[in-house]
């Protein structure tokens, strides 16, 4: 299974989906993808390091990165399917279109949708970055070490 995302930053919602996926599948590759349409707070290498730290105690998780089409990453990693988290109905519409396009590009590419716990259904990395940038408390939404790293990053940028 391949769980792709930008993970900028990794949130407790991401970790919830990763843990759920690991209960269903022996091997879950959490893959940081590059997205030229986004301006990440952290580099790909930093995000890989963050994921390795926060997933260290989750059995069956591998952390990697990819560039390009998701269907190529599925093939390159030898995955049988893609895991996508669904927080709300609005996510479903976009993710459904992406799943259909991925299947069109690669007929063997399946998508498995997992919903996070209700307490994380409103959490997004974009929101977390914005709250942190404006000096709000993000500690309920991200692992403690990610909280410290993100707040430090925004203090550095403000200088």
Image (spheres, rainbow, N blue to C red):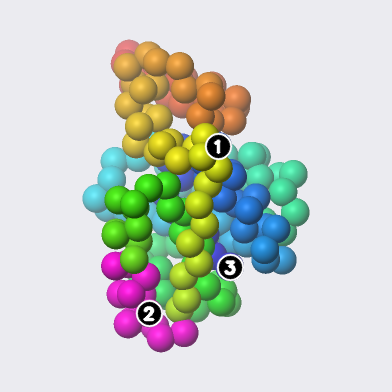
Q: Earlier in the sequence, mark 2 or mark 1?
A: 1
Q: Give the percent coordinates (x, y) of residue 111.
A: 46, 70
User: What percent of the width, then of the height, locates residue 117?
Assistant: 55, 43
Question: Residue at position x 65%, y 50% from top?
Answer: 19
Question: Which circle's residue, 3 or 2, is located before the other in the chain?
Answer: 3
Q: Residue at coordinates 56% horizontally, 77% vertically from top-left?
A: 80
Q: In the image, 144: left or right of 70? A: right
Q: Residue 98 in magenta?
A: yes
Label 3, label 2: how far apart the Cα atoms are? 15 Å
Q: Magenta residues, as a range?
A: 97-108
As displayed, is residue 88 above or below residue 158?
A: below
Q: Is residue 40 above or below residue 86?
A: above
- Write down the residue under mark 1: 12
Residue 54 in the image, given as x and y percentages of width and height: 64, 39
Q: Is residue 31 above or below residue 48?
A: below
Is 141 placed left or right of 124 in the picture?
right
Could you tell me how far apart the alpha carbons at marks 2 and 1 are, in whole angstroms? 29 Å
Residue holding disc 2: 103
Residue drawn at the location 50% of the way across and 52% of the way down: 115
Q: Quadrant of residue 104?
A: bottom left
Q: Which residue is mark 3?
A: 1
Q: Is residue 131 visible?
A: yes
Quarter of the picture containing the N terminus is: bottom right
Instruction: Answer with left or right where residue 74 lies relative to residue 100.
Output: right
Q: Is residue 31 visible?
A: no
**How would you rate the neighbour count of disc 1 (Cα within 10 Å): few for under 14, some for 14-19, many for 20 or more?**
many
């Amino acid at each position: 299974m391949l769980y792709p995302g930008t993970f900028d930053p990794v949130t407790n919602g991401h970790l919830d989906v990763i843990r759920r996926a690991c209960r269903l599948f022996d091997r879950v590759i959490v893959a940081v993808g590059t997205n030229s349409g986004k301006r990440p707070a952290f580099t790909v290498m930093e995000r890989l390091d963050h994921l390795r730290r926060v997933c260290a105690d989750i059995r069956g998780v591998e952390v990697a990165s990819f560039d390009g089409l998701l269907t190529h990453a599925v093939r390159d990693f030898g995955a049988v399917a893609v895991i996508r988290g669904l927080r709300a109905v609005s996510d479903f519409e976009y993710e459904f279109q992406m799943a259909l396009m991925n299947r069109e590009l690669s007929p063997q590419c399946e998508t498995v949708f997992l919903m996070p716990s209700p307490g994380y259904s409103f959490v997004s990395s974009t929101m977390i970055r914005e709250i942190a940038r404006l000096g709000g408390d993000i500690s309920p939404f991200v692992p403690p070490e990610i909280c410290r790293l993100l707040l430090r990053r925004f203090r550095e940028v403000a200088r």
